[in-house]
Image (cartoon, rainbow, N blue to C red):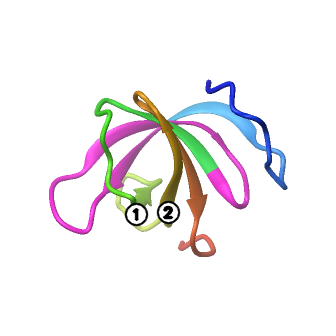
Amino acid sequence: MSKMFNRRRYRRRAFSFPARVQPIEGDPIVCTVCDISNTGAYIRAGLGDLPKSFKLILSNDGRIYRDCRVVWREGIEFGLEFQNRPVI
């Protein structure tokens, strides 16, 4: 995980959960959610380049997702800020 200074307002829960990045245009990108909180997440994606904003799909059927924006990136690791409340 990145050694960046921790400025998070909410504690994140560590785990390893498969998810998908869904850009506005293009195919989904498989990723792993490494930790998550009410306001953001830390993910690893197979690509070192993701769009600045996208939907993070958290369920197999796509009904649970969060709109995100990338706040930091380091190689294939990304820090995300959620832009909305959970959609279920």
The residue shown at (72%, 52%) is 37
Q: Position of residue 64 (x, y in %)?
A: 48, 64
Residue bearing mark 2: 68
Horizontal arrangement in the rendering, residue 44 relative to residue 40 (left or right): left
Does the magenta segment cover residue 27?
yes
> Which region is colored magenta?
18-40
Of the 4 image quadrants, the one containing the C terminus is bottom right
Which x, y percent locates residue 57?
41, 57
Q: Quadrant of residue 5?
A: top right
Q: Label 1: how many residues lie within 10 Å, few (<14), some (14-19) or many (20+)?
A: many
Q: Residue at x 35, y 51 (%)?
A: 21
Q: Main secondary structure of the magenta part?
A: strand
Callout 2 touching callout 1 (CB < 8 Å): yes
Q: Is residue 87 magenta?
A: no
Question: Vertical placement of 22 versus 87: above or below?
Answer: above
Which amino acid type corresponds to the residue marked 1 in the rendered image? Lys
In depth, the one of 73 and 87 nearer the eye is: 73
What's the amino acid at mark 2?
A: Cys
Point out the tag, 2 or 1, that comes first from the N-terminus: 1
Q: Residue at x 79, y 39 (%)?
A: 6
- What secondary structure is marked by label 2? strand
Distance Cα–Cα, label 2 vs label 1: 6 Å
Is residue 49 shown left or right of residue 1?
left
| Residue 56 position by quadrant | bottom left
Q: Which mark is residue 83?
A: none
In what element is the residue under mark 1?
Answer: strand
Q: Which residue is mark 1?
A: 55
Position of 73 with respect to 8 (left or right) is: left
